Image: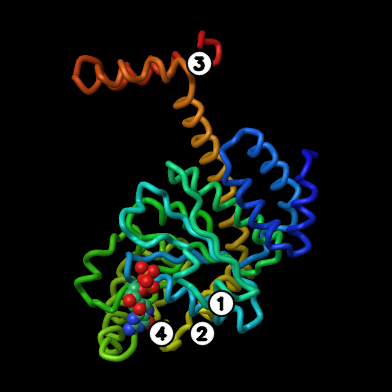
Amino acid sequence: MTQGVDELAAGIRSGDRRALARAITLVESSRPDDQERAAALLDELVADAGGALRVGITGSPGVGKSTFIEAYGLHLVETGHKVAVLAVDPSSQRTGGSILGDKTRMPGLASSPDAFIRPSPSGATLGGVARRTREAVTLCEAFGFDVVIIETVGAGQSEGTVADLVDVFVLLVGPGGGDDLQGIKRGIMELADVLVVTKADGDLAATARHTAGDYRHALELLRPKEGAGAAPVLACSSLAGEGIAEVADTVAGLRADWAASGRLTELRAGQAAAWMWNDVQARLSEAVHSHPAVVRLAPELEAQVTAGTLSPTTAARRLLDAFRPDAPS
Ligand code: GDP
């Protein structure tokens, strides 16, 4: 085995947090030699992984994700769990919002010895960021975290990708009532296993209850995911700590039901197969983009395509001809 990998694997298995942090940095690295060591490490640890409850948390900026994760995470820690918080936040989507998985947004959790928070890996493509996060999940599970929370912003493509990483997907929505309901894309609603109305306290408490009723009604009209009932809708206040235990119980209950019925095994098998092809696609795309002949040819072809003098199909075919392994580079 590659040097250093044994040591990292042993460190992770023995609960050394510095080893875990170093290992995540290794899987995030794009250097070929690091990638080789990362692959060896993941192969070594994969048998120790798979045991955690994997929870996805999504919602628009300002909906209360970090405040919720702080409250939910601390509740989990208080009830004896070890919690890792990871984030999927492709840089292209990071436009002025707060940084997901930022420790300062979850101060209580950040200082807990039973919690681990890691911001999103940086990377140009969602596929690349998601792959590194998936590998970080493996490392966190091998370390012994029994709950892994993955945070993402519900404003783009990333929630579909995160749904492929988790067992239970939680959508947070504001207590805004009907207006908000219109703004939430149907696709995100369909991905959600649990819907939680945030900020159900003070002046907003009554509105939040109404909003929960509206969503319940809306979800009944949507066709539920195969084999599932309509997603439960709850309301909570992360600041007052109300309804947090109920969310935690609902998420854990769904996971337990699915484990008992075989649905969890099926879900994870489907995710693993999807990830294999995602990986093929992501690596192939990276290889094409960095191939010398492609790099040389692309600007001219792109100029012709933009000018309308060459069809995109022909240009794509020429680039792929240049990429062919037997083509001169
Ligand atoms: P994020 O951008 O989705 O991570 O949202 P934040 O967790 O940063 O919260 C955005 C704002 O909503 C902050 O000002 C929070 O104090 C506020 N907030 C979050 N949770 C609650 C809650 O349970 N009740 C109330 N009243 N405000 C909340």
Identify the residue at horizontal 57%, vertical 64% (top origin).
Answer: 54
Identify the residue position indicated by label 2 in the image.
245
Q: Amino acid at mark 3?
A: Arg
Identify the residue position indicated by label 3 in the image.
324
First in sequence: mark 3 vs mark 4: 4
Identify the residue at horizontal 32%, vertical 19% (top origin).
Answer: 299
On screen, 95 above or below 300?
A: below
First in sequence: mark 2 vs mark 3: 2
Q: Relative to the observer, which residue lies in front, 233 or 20?
A: 20
Question: Would you say the beta carbon of the disc 4 residue lies within 8 angstroms of ligand 1?
Answer: yes
First in sequence: mark 1 vs mark 2: 2
Identify the residue position indicated by label 4 in the image.
239
Q: Amino acid at mark 2?
A: Ala
The image quadrant where one finds ligand 1 is bottom left
* Local crowd size for mark 1, using a 10 Å CA cut-off: few (<14), some (14–19), many (≥20): few
Identify the residue at horizontal 76%, vertical 57% (top origin).
Answer: 11
Q: Disc 4 versus disc 2: distance between alpha carbons? A: 13 Å
Residue 170 locus on image (x, y percent):
44, 69
- Of circles 3 and 4, the one toward us is 4
Identify the residue position indicated by label 1 in the image.
253
- Of circles 1 and 4, the one toward us is 4
Q: Are marks 1 and 3 in contact (CB under 8 Å)?
A: no
Residue 112 locus on image (x, y percent):
60, 76
- Of circles 1 and 3, the one toward us is 3
First in sequence: mark 4 vs mark 2: 4
Q: Amino acid at mark 1?
A: Gly
On screen, 159 above or below 321?
A: below
Q: Is residue 193 left or right of residue 166?
A: left
Q: Are marks 3 and 4 in contact (CB under 8 Å)?
A: no
Q: Disc 2 versus disc 3: distance between alpha carbons? A: 56 Å
Scheme of image coloration: rainbow
